[in-house]
Amino acid sequence: MTTLTTASVLAFERNLDISDATFTQIDSQKPDAKASMVKVREKSVRGTISNRLKNAIANDPTKLDAEIQKPNLQTVDVATLDDDKDTLIARWSCKVLPFTGEPSVCNNSDYQAKLIDTVSGYLQQHGVNELARRYAANIVNARWLWRNRMGAETIRIQVRTQIDGKDQTLEFADAKAHPLNHFDWQADGLSQLSDWIAKGLRGEAFVILYIEARAKVGYGQEVYPSQELILDTGNRKSKVLYQINDKAGMHSQKVSNAIRTIDTWYPNAQFPVAAEPYGAVTTLGTAFRQPKKGDDFYTLFDNWVLKGTAPSVDEQHYVISVLIRGGVFGASGKE
Amino acid sequence: MNHANYYLLFDRIQIQAANAISGPLSYGFPSLNGFLGAIHALNRRLPESDGITLGGVLVACHHCDVQLYRPHAYADATFNQSRNPLKKNGDTAAIIEEGKVHLTVSLLVEVRKADQVWANLSQNPQASEWCTQVQNMLMQQRIAGGSVTSIGRTQLFESHQQDDMIAALLPAFVLMDAGQDLLAITRELQTGQQHLVNEFDEIQPACDENGAPLPSARPAQTEVTALDALIEVATLHHLPPDAKDSKEWRAYSVKSGRGWLVPLPVGYQGIAAPFAAGELAHCRTAEYPSQYVETIYSLGKWVFPFRLPENFQQCFWRYATPQDNLYLITQPPAH
């Protein structure tokens, strides 16, 4: 028998398929009024010179004055609530697809058989309840609102779904009461929500969750949709915000990064990071799981599947959560 | 070929972040393969016991939002990109350029049911149950690389309900083959006389009211090929004034007056001998034979449903039987 090698072409589809979040707004004093959309508009401002200047300029008053007199004009996109609306409504949907460990592309059938075998072993032993609970917690604590969560007074979360042909709704009155840096907390309805997610992952039902947050951020306050990554801006506008049919919105990638922020299993964990192959957090510029220490996804995964040495239970959860995230994991030499 | 007993309408499928690059040279809408492939994959997942096969697909687009940025009307458009997770040492990963599009499309699919047929379609519980079932299956799939976020409804039509189907598609534009128009343009460029496609899909010279042939705006070039004609469709000429005392320049394109023409990849041509299954290294799957191919281009046309040909079956795209190393998607006129 030949030794098993990682398939050179190997890819997983994401199992939590998340839509873009769209932003609308409402006045909390008139809860029955129709929500209007949050628009992205352009504003041009004259900035001050506030960056660090070279010593030669900073120490010479005339040169500094000359520098300060430069207008520093900027055009940026901005999104705010109207001055008579104080509540941001963000809405998105999450499809939970069955997770069996079967890759969407794999060019090595022996490897695929071993892989499915490994994953089904995990599923039998641990099930998906732990992961589902953490995903559910990240929906309920409104982590996915990112910066909008910070400035909000209260956030209500509503989750709707249809299970066995019956409409079901869960309400969470105060998302800000739930902590972001650990998962040891309970809330009414949280276990129900994680049940639905687990059901979807096990393939027992077709689960699509409709999630809506009502964040009270204040009249006319700024809200934070996603920013577009534009390679060639033509130097006209330095910030372009995401909009869907003229409605401000948040990229699905950004929402889904928050939902999969469940990895508290990396060494010396202080807070959860997103389930990523190297435990990468872009905003901190840090990879929390270094291959040098052997706790990154590829090392754990290869040891588990190829050599059959199962990592610790926590690390198994991590590996499976990366598979649920999806991605290209083949051994073709491109990371 | 057997005729379809039924037509299955997937009404207003919202697809998020589908691939906007349809071939090496064209962008803006996913390739036909994306839609036909999705229906083909759906067909393979249908339980065999149902005795149902899905056939050709009609593609109708309601809304198409290519994710790009253009600072002003004369600037180049660039695709909005997404940032990738960090590499293992914390460095930012390179940006791999991608083109994404958000779509609302309706797909009409030919359905052949071999065993006993659903009677009284609208009140048949079996038929509507089957519709819900396939709708959920399609929801769990990707279409053209994008996620399906919602499907308006799924409905079966009987083959005589052509008018109802057209009404259900409104308002939209249906993608049709415009190969005849390409031939007409080729002939026009070759002869220097205007040619049009008549209602019987035949190419004939255009005449004025006295029956005299109308000259084309460009002189005849006998060596013109269909490829030149395809490039000519994408060209806008600025023609100098004919008369001495006129200062009016004219803009001229050969496609004006012919409808909404678009370049369209319609399949592939093999450029090397096929490899047997498992022979090609690093191929995506070892189960099927593979071959190196190049894209074949033709001309397509967006047509409003009221202007579709009387013969409705002509509107459906189907995989043609491969021959002469050609793997084409065609709209064969039904016999």
Image: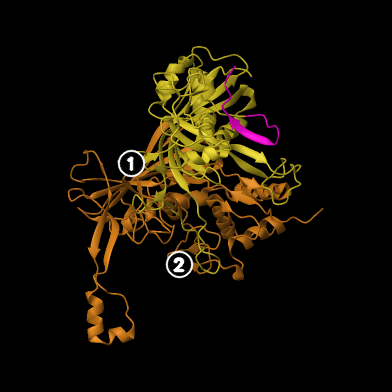
The location of residue B250, given as percent across then percent down, is 36, 40
Q: Main secondary structure of the magenta part?
A: loop
Task: Please tell me which residue is depicted at 52% across the width and 12% down the height of the picture.
Answer: B119
Q: Give amino acid for label 1.
A: Lys
**Does A84 appear above or below A280?**
above
- A167 sits left or right of A62 in the view: right
Residue that sits furthest to the front in the current view: B244
The location of residue A92, given as percent across then percent down, is 38, 44
Query: Residue B244 shows which numbered tag?
Result: 1
Q: Which residues are magenta?
A: B320-335
Give the structural element (helix, strand or loop) at label 2.
loop
**Does B127 appear above or below A312?**
above
The location of residue B96, given as percent across then percent down, is 52, 57
Q: Does the magenta run of residues contain A273?
A: no
Q: Give amino acid for label 2.
A: Gln
Between B162 and B91, the residue placed more toward the observer is B162
Q: Colour of chain B?
A: yellow
Task: Please tell me which residue is depicted at 46% across the width and 17% down the height of the picture.
Answer: B162
Q: Which chain is orange?
A: A
